[in-house]
Every structure is written in C-alpha cells, then in structure tokens.
C-alpha cells in the first residue's frame, strides 16, 4: 500500500497532534516526509516523540523505516512510464482556455481528496454538532460566500448558527458574547485578510474553538484552530479556485447528514412545514403551480373561419 493511502486510512485513531503531522504530510506529499523527524515535528508544531509514535502506529518500525519506504516510492514514481509520458506530453495548445481551466479544477478536486484525512471531517462534524453555544461563521472577500452556504446548511440541523458576512465594526461587537461554549468557523485563503485574522485571534483569546478552512500554505489562523481542512487553490487561471473548498464544505455537510439524530431530522421537518405554509418555493405554491401548468398547456385550435382562411 502506498504511504499516501496509509495516511488516508479511515480506521486510524489519530490524536490532534498526530492529525497535524498527517495533514502536513498529505499537503506537501511526498517532500514533507523526506527531511528529519525533528524538522517534520517542528513544521507540524509537535514534539519529536509524537512523530515517532505516529509512524509506528502507521505500521512502520520507526521513522528511518518510514522514510526509506517513502524514498523507494518516490524513486519508483520517477521511473514509471506513466510519469515519463506525462512529463513529455506536449502542452495542449489545441485545448480552449475553458477546457484547460476545467481540467485544472478537476485536478485540484483530486488533490483536495488527499489533502485532509477523513478523520478531520469527523472531528469537524462533532465540533459543530456538539457545541453547546453558538456557531459563528466568517470568511474573506470571496470565501465568505462559502461561509454563507454552510450557514444555510447548519441552520437546518441545529439552532444558534450565525453568519457574520462582511466584518464591519458591529460584527466585531459579537465577540463580547462569545466564549468556550462557542465555535468559530473561518474560511481564510491566501492572501489572508487582516480583519478575518484579527477576529479569529480575538475569538481564540476568549477560548472559542475554531474550525478553519484554508489552503495548502496555511492561514496564520491554523496556529489557533482546533480542526483545519486544507484545500488546493492553483488552477490554469490567474485567480485561485474555490471549487475544492466548496466541495469540502459540502462533504462535511454530507457527513453531518449521515449522522443526524431524530432531533435534527424533526427540526428539518418543522422547517419544511414552515416553508410550505409560506409558499417559499414553487413546489409549495398551488397558485404558482396552477399558473405554470396553464401557461405550459397548448391550446387546441378551433375551426378556422372563412376570413382566417383568406376567403371572402
């Protein structure tokens, strides 16, 4: 089994410190594991013994054994016909910019699958659904729209969910009511907004627990976050893509849905009843449905008059 596959195993019981190491190894795979155990520990912000315990838990005799197998894997890749074929392939000048971009987004989505262990999504789901206080969401200029989407999903599953939107001075006032019972969800991708970092830093000082969505270079907020979900950004465009970030947010939502209890399901049913009573959507408005059916029904033409036929 390839080391990447070992790191992605769903049956691993990882501590938060071990999860940091796995996330780092996957984010910069395979080069992140080619240095010393001390350098890996320093970059992950953990102790040297934690690195050794992790590789033993993964099934290796120690860090030298882990690194030897990683080097063998790298060497095999460098000599694989598939890699050589890819390296020598001509750049696709015949492809349109649209197709080239979509291909690069597909590749980014594949990288996103390997960038964060499955256990991280599980921990994120527990953090959100078991919080006793509020769930507050914030993001940057573009990523705050993903925060808004997640707010919409979470609001169906539990109470106390709030999207801050644009971080105005009034938004910072919400810090006065936050504490250790609350969770802050942050979407922060390069170039990392100062106001988002400031809000997260002040929230962390109040013992608010933080779930961070960020890129492979890691927002400075990662030092404060309890759980971090990493997304690749680079595509065939001068603009970074947020498609993998949206997919990761929806994957987290899918995991939450798969674990919902009766209370959450009953809440969704109540919300649906309210929406139906207020004719929020087309399928819940009888008048709109009737008008739609009438407008879509073709009229049967009657017998033409002599004048319509052009006869005198």
Image (cartoon, rainbow, N blue to C red):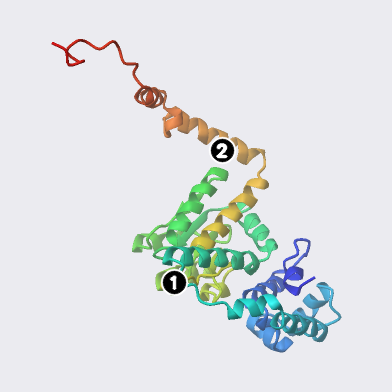
Identified at 47% across, 63% down, the residue is 99
Residue in the image at 39% along x and 22% along y: 290
In the picture provided, is 282 more to the left or to the right than 218? left
- Total number of numbered discs in the rendering: 2
Quarter holding residue 97: bottom left
Residue that protrudes farthest toward the front in the picture: 311
Residue 162 visible in the picture: yes
Q: Residue furthest right?
A: 61
The image quarter in which residue 301 lies = top left
**Residue 34, image x and y in percent?**
70, 86
Residue 268: which disc? 2
**Image location of residue 13, percent across then percent down:** 77, 64
Q: Residue at x 51, y 53 (%)?
A: 150
* Label annotation for residue 156: none
The x, y position of residue 11, in whole percent, is 78, 61
Q: In which quarter of the image is the C terminus?
A: top left
In this rendered view, identify the residue nearer to me: 205 or 295: 295
Task: Work out which quarter of the rendered image holds the N terminus and state it.
Answer: bottom right
148 to 46, vertically: above or below: above
In the displayed orientation, state which residue is furthest to the left: 312
Q: Do the residues labelled 2 and 1 touch (CB within 8 Å)?
A: no
Q: How far apart are marks 2 and 1 (CA)?
A: 34 Å
Q: Can residue 228 be seen in this view?
A: no
Mark 1 is surrounded, within 10 Å at the Cα level, by few (under 14), some (14 to 19) or many (20 or more) other residues, namely few
Closer to the camera in the image, 155 or 34: 34
Element type at mark 2: helix
| Relative to 233, 76 lies left or right | right
Q: Please tell me whether mark 1 sits on a helix, a strand or a loop.
A: helix
Q: Whole-percent x and y of residue 138?
A: 46, 61
Which mark sits nearer the N-terminus, 2 or 1?
1
* Front-most of residues 311 and 232: 311
Determine which residue is flagged by label 1: 198
């Amino acid at each position: 089994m390839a080391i990447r596959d070992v790191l992605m195993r769903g049956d691993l019981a990882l501590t938060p410190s071990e999860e940091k190491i796995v996330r780092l190894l996957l984010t910069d795979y395979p080069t992140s594991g080619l240095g010393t155990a001390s350098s890996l520990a320093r970059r992950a912000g953990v102790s040297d013994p934690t690195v050794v315990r992790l590789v033993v838990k993964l099934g290796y005799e120690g860090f030298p054994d882990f690194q030897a197998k990683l080097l063998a894997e790298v060497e095999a890749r460098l000599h694989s016909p598939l890699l050589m074929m890819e390296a020598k392939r001509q750049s696709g000048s015949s492809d349109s910019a649209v197709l080239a971009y979509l291909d690069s987004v597909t590749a980014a989505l594949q990288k996103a699958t390997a960038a964060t262990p499955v256990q991280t999504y599980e921990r994120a789901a527990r953090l959100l659904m078991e919080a006793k206080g509020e769930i507050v969401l914030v993001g940057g200029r573009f990523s705050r729209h993903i925060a808004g989407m997640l707010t919409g999903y979470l609001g169906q599953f539990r109470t106390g969910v709030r999207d801050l939107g644009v971080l105005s001075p009034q938004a910072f006032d919400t810090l006065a009511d936050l504490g250790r019972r609350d969770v802050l969800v942050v979407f922060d991708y390069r170039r990392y907004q100062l106001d988002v970092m400031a809000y997260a830093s002040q929230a962390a000082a109040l013992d608010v627990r933080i779930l961070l969505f960020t890129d492979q270079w890691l927002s400075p907020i990662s030092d404060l976050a309890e759980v971090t979900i990493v997304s690749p950004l680079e595509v065939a465009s001068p603009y970074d893509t947020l498609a993998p970030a949206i997919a990761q947010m929806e994957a987290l939502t899918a995991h939450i849905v798969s674990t919902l209890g009766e209370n959450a399901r009953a809440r969704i049913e109540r919300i649906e009843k309210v929406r139906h009573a207020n004719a929020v959507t087309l399928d819940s408005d009888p008048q709109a449905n009737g008008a739609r059916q009438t407008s879509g029904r073709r009229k049967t033409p009657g017998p033409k008059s002599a004048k319509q036929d052009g006869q005198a």
